[in-house]
């Protein structure tokens, strides 16, 4: 009598039967290992987190922690165990760090932001980029306010991470304490300069208008994304300064379509036809 089921197509192939049996046994071993971890008291689970690089069932421990639904106090205890694990991982050989860095990110990302952020905060300026990226991911969960904007600018100045600037650009409130005319040139990518202008446009239109002359493409793109038809007169002023700039005319045409400025679209088409005749 067979002690495990075998698909009919394998029944006459001894090698495939042996491989199938091996795979089933490995699956049972993993299931048992996870069952054992699930049966651990919470304090033992915390201890396992802190010993993750030294135990054989580390994958099962991480899985269990990520599916666990902690109370508020347990969440803070889990975060503290992750902090201690991170200190241990920092001392590991480089080849071993990525596995446990990924585990740290997985666990922290599943904890409430209020518990995770105190652990991740110091990592904004960590020497390893992956750890900084973990801090950025947690910061996105907590929300980025005016104070965080200044901190992220300091992080950029320390690390050179464009991601720190991008987080500012994603959050209108983070722009309030910044001298944006000095910050905008720090962005390597025009798209993210536009996103910063857009964030300011959302937060303080008057302030955004002061950027239009120095950053016409970014401003025009932002107006189009926000579909601010009432700002078409400002775009018309920019056109007067950029009337021969094909790069600007392209984004201007797009923005007019976004806001539905049909009359301006007609005038732009006439302008383009004149340029063609004079070329």
Image (cartoon, grey):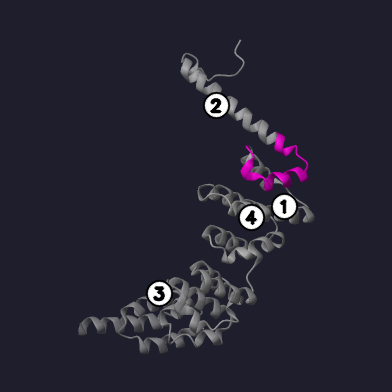
Q: Is residue 44 left or right of residue 59?
A: right
- For label 1, the residue is 78
Q: Residues within 10 Å of mark 1 (few under 14, many from 20)?
A: many
Q: Is residue 88 above or below residue 277?
A: above
Tell me the quarter of the image containing the N terminus.
top right
Report the residue at 64% width, 39% height from top. 55
Asked whether residue 260 appears in the rendered view, the answer is no
Mark nearer the N terminus (3 vs 1): 1
Q: Which residue is mark 4?
A: 87
Mark toward the start of the polypeptide (3 vs 4): 4
Could you tell which of marks 3 and 2 lies nearer the N-terminus?
2
Question: What residue does disc 2 label?
Answer: 23
Q: CA distance from mark 4 to mark 2?
A: 36 Å
Earlier residue among tags 2 and 1: 2
Q: Nearer the viewer, mark 3 or mark 1?
A: 1
Among the 4 quarters of the image, the one containing residue 267: bottom left
Q: Is residue 36 visible?
A: yes
Q: Which one is closest to the eye, mark 2 or mark 1?
A: 1
Is 155 on the left or on the right of 15, as rendered? right
Nearer to us: label 1 or label 4 = 4
Q: Using the numbered discs, state the Cα–Cα distance from disc 3 to disc 1 in whole angstroms.
A: 50 Å
Quarter holding the C terminus is bottom left
Q: Which residue is mark 3?
A: 254
């Amino acid at each position: 009598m067979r002690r495990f089921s075998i698909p009919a197509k394998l029944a006459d192939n001894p090698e495939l039967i042996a491989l199938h049996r091996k795979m089933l046994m490995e699956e049972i071993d993993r299931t048992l290992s996870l069952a054992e971890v699930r049966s651990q008291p919470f304090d033992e689970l915390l201890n396992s987190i802190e010993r993750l690089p030294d135990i054989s069932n580390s994958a099962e421990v991480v899985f269990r922690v990520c599916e666990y639904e902690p109370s508020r106090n347990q969440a803070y205890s889990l975060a503290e165990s992750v902090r201690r694990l991170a200190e241990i991982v920092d001392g590991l050989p480089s080849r071993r760090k990525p596995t446990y860095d990924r585990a740290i990110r997985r666990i922290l990302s599943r904890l409430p932001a209020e518990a995770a952020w105190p652990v991740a905060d110091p990592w904004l300026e960590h020497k390893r980029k992956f750890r900084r990226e973990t801090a950025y991911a947690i910061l996105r969960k907590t929300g980025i306010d005016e104070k965080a904007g200044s901190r992220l600018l300091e992080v950029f100045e320390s690390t050179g991470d464009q991601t720190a600037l991008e987080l500012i650009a994603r959050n209108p409130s983070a722009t309030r304490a910044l001298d944006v005319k000095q910050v905008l040139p720090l962005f390597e990518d025009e798209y993210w300069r536009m996103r910063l202008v857009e964030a300011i446009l959302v937060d303080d239109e008057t302030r955004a208008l002061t950027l239009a002359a120095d950053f016409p493409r970014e401003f025009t793109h932002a107006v189009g994304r926000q579909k601010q038809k009432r700002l078409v007169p400002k775009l018309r002023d920019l056109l007067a300064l950029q009337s021969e700039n094909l790069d600007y005319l392209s984004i201007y045409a797009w923005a007019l379509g976004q806001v539905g400025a049909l009359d301006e679209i007609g005038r732009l088409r006439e302008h383009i036809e004149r340029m063609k005749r004079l070329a």
